[in-house]
Amino acid sequence: MAEEFEPKIVAFLCKWCSSAGSDLAGVSRMQYPSNVVPITVMCSGSVSPLYILSAFNKGADGVLVSGCHPGDCHYIKGNYYARRRIALVKELLEFTGLEPERFQMSWVSAAEGKKYTEIIKDFVKILKPLGPQKKLGRSQ
Amino acid sequence: MKKRTGVFVCHCGINIAGTVDVKKVADKLSKHDGVAHSEDYVYMCSDPGQKLITNAIKENNLDSIVVSCCSPNLHEKTFQNAAKAGGINEFQSEIANIREQCSWVHKDKEKATVKAEKITRSAVERVIRNESLDPISFPVTRRGMVIGAGIAGIQAALDMANTGYEVILVEKNPSIGGHMIQLSETFPTLDCSQCILSPKMVEVSKHENIKLLTYSEVQEVSGYVGNFKVKIKKNPTFVDPKKCTLCDECTKVCPVVTSNEFDLGLTGRRAIYMPFPQAIPATYTLDDKNCPGLLPIACGKCSDVCDPGAIDYDQKPEIIEEEVGAIVVATGFDLYGKEEMGEYGYGKYADVLDGLQFERLCSASGPTQGKILRPSDHKVPKEVVFIQCSGSRDPELHCAYCSKICCMYTAKHALLYKHHVPDGQAYIFYIDIRSGGKGYEEFVQRVIEEDDVVYLRGKVSKIFEDNGKITVWGVDTLSGKNVEINADLVVLAQAMRPSKDADKLAKLLKIGTDKDGFLQEAHPKLRPVESVTAGMFLAGAAQAPKDIPEAVAQASGAAAKAVAILSQENLFHSPQVAKNFPNLCTGCGMCVDVCPYGALSLKDGKVEVNEILCEGCGTCSATCLRAAIEVKNITPLQIYEMINASLGG
Amino acid sequence: MVNLDDLKKEAHRILEENKVKYIIGYSQGSNGFPAVPAFIRNPEDSDNLIWNPACIHNLTRFLRDEKKRKAREKHPDNRPVGIIVKGCDSRAINVLLQENYITREDVFILGVSCEDTGVIDEKKLAKKLMGKMALSFDWDGNRNLVVTTKNGEIKINADEVLAERCLECPAQSPVVYDILFGDKVKRSPETRFESVEKIEKLSTEERWAFWKEQFDKCIRCYACRSVCPMCYCDECVVDTISFAVTADTTAEEKAQKIKWIDKSPVPSETFFYHMVRAIHLAGRCIDCGECERVCPLDIPIRFLNKKLEKEAKNLFDYEVGFDPNQLSLVSSFKDEDPEDFIR
């Protein structure tokens, strides 16, 4: 039997909420699939569209951007800029034919280890049937 | 620029090694481009572990290190210091989090090992592009400020002032003292509240290091830890305290009677008034909202009788600018309004009081000189019902949280009532009795046993006025029976809520509030007196409901934290800040617009970074269309390489 | 109707009075092209100016060259440049003002209103003429294009020859100008995003098939970038081709240069390029359609920009180029910005 497809996911997590939330998932020993490699950034507001496109270009099957809930940003308002910027990138990618499921954004607070776990579980589950992302990926 | 990076993979006992093949990770990484040394060890954070890193740096001539271990929140500093001990810059150390974000959340050893390897490679790609940086040093304005002069603010100001630093104490009311000065006795010792607070108030007024600004409000705050600029508006009192002899002739002639805030509306006061006899500063205030005109034509009676000529109708609000290095916020609480309590008559019954009003009723200096008389007909109430959790612990209708002090002060109220009216009967409706605290449980037992107070476990569904009595419908959940009491007086232990306009102040200060509007501490357990903004500290009930000893303790804690800043000649700021590339900048100013700290500005058509204001969030970098600004040591190039490494393999 | 003689007269006047150093406008092209950009320096040459439905070009693109030229001059001539702008072009001026790229004093704006028409789509017209050579053409005032050919006059309904962007244009007359020619018209098109909606209606896979075919054609000539008035960066972040190494380029800048994409025009890299261009034009593109017009492979690049124009409007109520003082789309936010896509 062929090996099950394991999607590769890059997650941009803000240092103060989402990365801390994913730490909490670890401290609480919650279990989720190992498909996600997190990249901790200072703020979701610092995630440039170039990072997202680059992740897809380098062969990511899914990309997650996660920040603090509105009003909770460690930097006061970075996540509001992120929300706007990511909305535009998401619209554009879907317009050009990328499956909308492949690019997600979430708010995960430092207390939401469980939510982070659920997000990753669901993300992997939804990506598996889609198969490898070849549209934007650089052909090997 | 080929680097010589060392990789150190920690087993963390079996915390990591149980799920990740640490030897394999170390082995794979040893072949990574730029890695000159790679090894694993059982506890990298242990003293031998740190020594191992320090020695490896020296022996292998390493210029940067990656430690694959737990979350950087735990040991980032430890390994930065190990790097320093090895003779390299602390910013040449990066953490790869392979515990919280890997070994603890996965079971499949093979997959977890692959992931740990990717996380470590990603950190290596980052660290080989790190710049060596030195913390940015800046001088400290060595004076403090305390906002709010209740017991917490007074304590914080005194503690700071006693260490030798000048303190500006800002209070919005005409006198300091806060709610504590309104209380009669304090639980569990029954000290007279005014007797224990007024010495501290006097000390404030006489302290050479304290500059007291009453009747004043903070209007604007700019700057950063160590160097805040605060604009304060001092409202006019229309009375010159230097000339005023406190003869009290003015209040006798003032034709206006308005509700007295100090007695919570149980008495009246004149438009010109002294809030209470022990007020600090001891002077009169003319309340221009109630004064008929501030003009000799409109009234002028107070001015006419004032022999020393202390009354000055021409006083204007004054804007005072102060520079301080640290700020303690102690804005206190207000009671949740009776008018919010539909089930308890929206505050429209005269004989339904809140806890603070009852304090005034019991107080020797109160409206009845300490006799307990009910407001409607001034008769001694023979049956009094106290209702706890009025507005608290009610997520559907009111406040979800426990106000913490009501169990204790209600017990005290019942006791005081019984001492004043020995033949009266006190009933207390409660949900639970929470009496955690030194001597608190004993106090409650004393009230139940010695003073025959009837504790009824249950909620009151409705109260209404009926034939000169207040009828209370409740349920005793222990007996399962409905209870009806025809009381003479009802006292509601109203929930504590943040003081009015505390949210506006929090916005000005850029410190957060929690879901209930209380000021947000930086960490609920480990940093309970710090706000989320560096250099601003929290004290008292502004942060959460608390009693006097807790408020005082937190105030002293906040003062110590503030003094820790003021005692420094220079502070240091993280050098991981934005950096601009003038050659690429077109001066469009988008980054300036998004910067939450005002750290960016345009000069001669190019952006400039104020490194002390910049917190390094990087929103500028994601907004810039031209890659003309980035944050040091987390640059787009580093992220680009980290993406590559994260997807590799 | 725009009176061409008035336009010429004013152009003559401002040149003669030394109000402007030169005027960027349109003149008759040779070689069958009905209009080409023209740079008028002498008052008497004002007579060469034309205004007709073929004045397609967004001349604000030349302000880039002007700015660069001026930066190199030791003693720059600080008089403004006269420039002829249509409604769309005027909004480009506003965006350039918003981004501090130019100041209002840098330009003397001769606004021409498209009134109830716009400019033609050369390809649509060619189809209509079926090989016949147009000698001249103009609008007749009733939304018809009257084309004079050797074989006589042909009348074509405006909707059949107007450029698609003109049919979807939200403001046909200039929003910023010093002198306005023609009538101020405010027509709200019913079909402002029709071209985009057609693509949106397709399934994900159909959309991908559509764009894949388009991007497969791209030869990465960067004409779209060269013609765009908003692509004024000295160096484009997505490629290393235009990376200008000057005397003050630091070693660090060279080292920091990221090769986000490969130079070779393989689909993934081409896709990346077009995505970044679209994102960087979000809230800045005023839909002059120049990128699409100059594309030698007929890639409908405009749709990408139009899509983001639509989302800016629908999601954030953001309109591009009407107010030079507004904050940029991505450097502002509202508390109520939609977040239903966020978990």
Image (tube, helix red, strand yellow):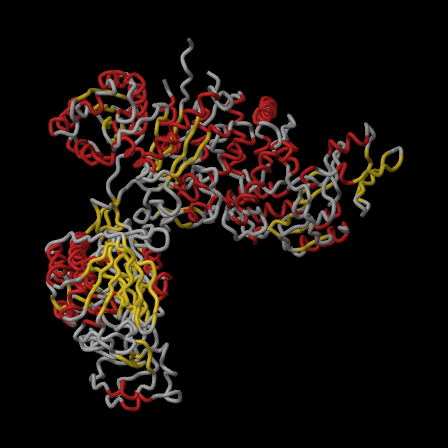
- Quadrant housing the N terminus of chain B: top left
Which quadrant of the view contains residue B551?
Answer: bottom left
Q: Is residue B637 left or right of residue B476?
A: right
Q: Is residue B35 above or below residue C170?
A: above
Q: Nearer the viewer, residue C300 or B433?
A: B433
Picture coordinates of residue A110, whole percent (x, y): 31, 39
Lateral position of residue B561 relative to residue B322, left or right? left
Along the line of sight, the residue nearer the viewer: C183 or B400:
B400
Q: Is residue B584 above or below residue B533?
A: above
Is C199 in front, or is C85?
A: C199
Q: Is residue B325 above or below residue C314?
A: below
Residue B323 seen in the figure: no
The image quadrant that residue C131 belongs to is top right
Quadrant of the frame with the C terminus of chain B:
top left
Q: Residue at x 18, y 70 (%)?
A: B424
Q: Nearer the viewer, residue B147 or A70?
A: A70
